[in-house]
Image (spheres, rainbow, N blue to C red):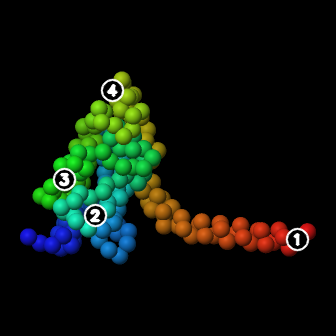
Amino acid sequence: MSSPSKRREMDLMKLMMSDYKVEMINDGMQEFYVEFNGPKDSPYHGGVWKIRVELPDAYPYKSPSIGFINKIYHPNVDEMSGSVCLDVINQTWSPMFDLVNVFEVFLPQLLLYPNPSDPLNGEAAALMMRDRAAYDQRVKEYCEKYAKPEDIGAKAEDMSSDEELSEDEYAASDDDEIAGKADP
């Protein structure tokens, strides 16, 4: 059997070759973003999400960490952190699975068949159980507001410039203080 690092490289290359846009976060192959489209025949159709994937050192023996970067309204996704509650990824992961399975099977199944009885977003779960039409409408509103192709592009720019902005703001506040002290 191949080593975890070889398997990681192979799975990542397989994902890149299968029509998914993959953006590396660092120089290594352990953290990256994947562009994910909502499945057809679901209220998520037309939505585009940036998914953060972190592969542990022990991958494929240990499951990847998966999270939505832009907002999604779903009972099994934490609205603030984007964390995913998905048994296949979190509890029943097997080295037989690979990254393509995550994006072609597991995530589409999660969006097509939410599980409101095991929620990370209690409000979405309650709305889904109480009024499916209103839930579907809220999903579509979130797709319109947060999951357009330009949203994932803007999010990437925001993330890459956050440090620069905070440093600039920090430097600007220091300049203002110094200028304020010098002027009576």
Residue 129 marker:
4
Residue at 81% in and 72% down? 179
Of circles 4 and 2, the one toward us is 2
Question: Dot 4: within a 10 Å radius of its alpha carbon, few (fewer than 14), some, or many (20 or more) residues?
Answer: few
> Which is nearer the eye, 47 or 169?
169
Amino acid found under the numbered disc labelled 1: Asp
The Cα atoms of the two marked residues, 1 and 4, are separated by: 63 Å
| Contact between labelled residues 2 and 4, with CB atoms less than 8 Å apart | no
Amino acid found under the numbered disc labelled 2: Leu
Residue at 31% in and 51% down? 37
| SS at mark 4 in the image | helix
Residue 93 marker:
3
Q: Where is residue 100 in the image (x, y as percent from the top left)?
A: 20, 58
Q: Mark 1 points at which residue?
A: 183
Q: Which of marks 1 and 4 is nearer the N terminus?
A: 4
| SS at mark 2 in the image | loop
Q: Which of marks 3 and 2 is nearer the N terminus?
A: 2
Question: Dot 2: within a 10 Å radius of its alpha carbon, few (fewer than 14), some, or many (20 or more) residues?
Answer: some
Amino acid found under the numbered disc labelled 3: Trp
The Cα atoms of the two marked residues, 1 and 2, are separated by: 54 Å
Q: Can residue 70 be seen in this view?
A: yes
Residue at 57% in and 70% down? 164
Q: Earlier in the sequence, mark 3 or mark 4?
A: 3
Amino acid found under the numbered disc labelled 4: Met
Identify whether 119 is placed above or below 183. above
Residue at 24% in and 37% down? 113
Residue 55 marker:
2
Q: Position of residue 169 (x, y in %)?
A: 65, 66
| Contact between labelled residues 2 and 1, with CB atoms less than 8 Å apart | no
| Contact between labelled residues 4 and 1, with CB atoms less than 8 Å apart | no
